[in-house]
Image (cartoon, rainbow, N blue to C red):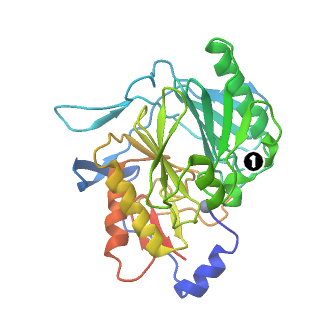
Amino acid sequence: MRKLWTPLLCVLACGGEEPAASDGTTTGSTAAATTSGTDVTTTEGATTTVSTTTTGTTADPATTTSTTSTSDDSSTGATTSATTGVQECAGELPAHWIDGTDCGSEPQVQVHQYSSDTWILRQSLCTSFEGPFMMLLFGSERALLLDTGDGDIPIDDIVHGLVDDWSQAHGGAPIELVVGNTHAHGDHVAGNDLFVGDADTSIVGIGEAAVRQFFGIDGWPEQIVQYDLGGRVLDIVPLPGHEKAHIAVYDPATGVVFTGDTLYPGRLYIADFPAYVASIGRLVDHLADKEVCRVLGAHIEMTNTPGEDFEFMQPSHPDEHPLELDLAHLLELRDAVEAMQEPVIEVHDDFIVYPL
Ligand SMILES: [Zn+2]
């Protein structure tokens, strides 16, 4: 999320501080982790593995589709090597996300098949400097769309097309599309209204009350509930702090935690610091006995130089940080915010803690 008033608020609240870049000199680094319970040792300078999945096959004027071949969401997608302790992920990420560097040719939305039943969509920075990511998760009975982008994209046509294709490939019976959001900010919900009145489509609704009601969360934000897509049960984790209706979604099938704007490689704007700290703690605790292979947020604002972010509203992202983070980053974030005596901007290699 970046709201247009954010720099102003920060000037007022942060004394005009600008996040200072670290003096890291390596490129493509991320924190490689050895996990034990919820503790972690980080090793600086490890290189992020970026999949070499084929990408960029133009499917129609609005989309680019890249496809993986052999992932199976029917069982746990994340496995842990007995010898290394490093978790292996079944899902594949593209070699390159559209990044606004070629507006003459890049599609409005890049559609990437992450695994057999999971798609990741990215809105072009040429249509919105936010360049948000959206997720589409299929079970046997319904599909959940997490976020609808920042507007001016045919997200309804794209997603309905994916749902129809999935249905045809799985017997032809229509399945329900559930349109939900990681949180209520405009760059994640702008396309919601495009789905109103569509056949076989339900919309969760925007804001804490709607989210609580739809998922049956009586004890917000402490209560974590499960939501069954049909043979694929997701954990819905209330995560207020960045925004009060924020949720995380943990997917045991792929071992992915979808963290929206709470954790991604960029500026982690925090509106309610105590709520945010508590939310991160609850998420870490919930994941302590789970297999986590990736943490996927909703934006990229870091470059491939450790600690360096793109300028606010920058319309293109050359040499962009990979989307994927991992459990070590979540633990690093937990430790950072819990250690703060008062909320301050703090630059890390792969994200920037950014209290408002
Ligand atoms: Zn946001």
Q: Position of residue 273 (x, y in %)?
A: 47, 74
Residue type at tag 1: Asn
In the image, residue 16 sits, relative to residue 117, either above or below, namely below
Q: Secondary structure at mark 1?
A: helix
Comparing 72 with 306, the one in front is 72
Number of marks drawn: 1
| Residue at the outermost left position | 83
Residue 15 visible, this angle: yes
Comparing 143 with 28, the one in front is 143
Residue 58 visible, this angle: no
Q: Is residue 60 rendered to the left or right of residue 261?
A: right
| Residue at the outermost front position | 218
Choose top left, top right, bottom left or bottom right for residue 156. Answer: top right
Residue at horizontal 49%, vertical 34%? Answer: 93
* Badge 1: residue crowd in 10 Å (few <14, some 14–19, many ≥20): many
Residue at horizontal 23%, vertical 49%? Answer: 35
In the image, residue 14 sits, relative to residue 126, either above or below, namely below
Comparing 51 with 275, the one in front is 275
Choose top left, top right, bottom left or bottom right for residue 310. Answer: bottom right
Q: Position of residue 169 (x, y in %)?
A: 63, 14
Choose top left, top right, bottom left or bottom right for residue 103. Answer: top right
Q: Is residue 244 rendered to the left or right of residue 201?
A: left
Which quarter of the rendering shows the N terminus? bottom right
State ligand 1's quadrant. bottom right
Which quarter of the rendering shows the C terminus? bottom right
Residue at horizontal 60%, vertical 66%? Answer: 311
Q: Position of residue 125 (x, y in %)?
A: 69, 50
- Asked if the beta carbon under badge 1 is closer than 8 A to the nearest atom of ligand 1, the reply is no
Q: Is residue 149 rendered to the left or right of residue 152?
A: left
Q: Which residue is mark 1?
A: 192
| Residue at the outermost right position | 197
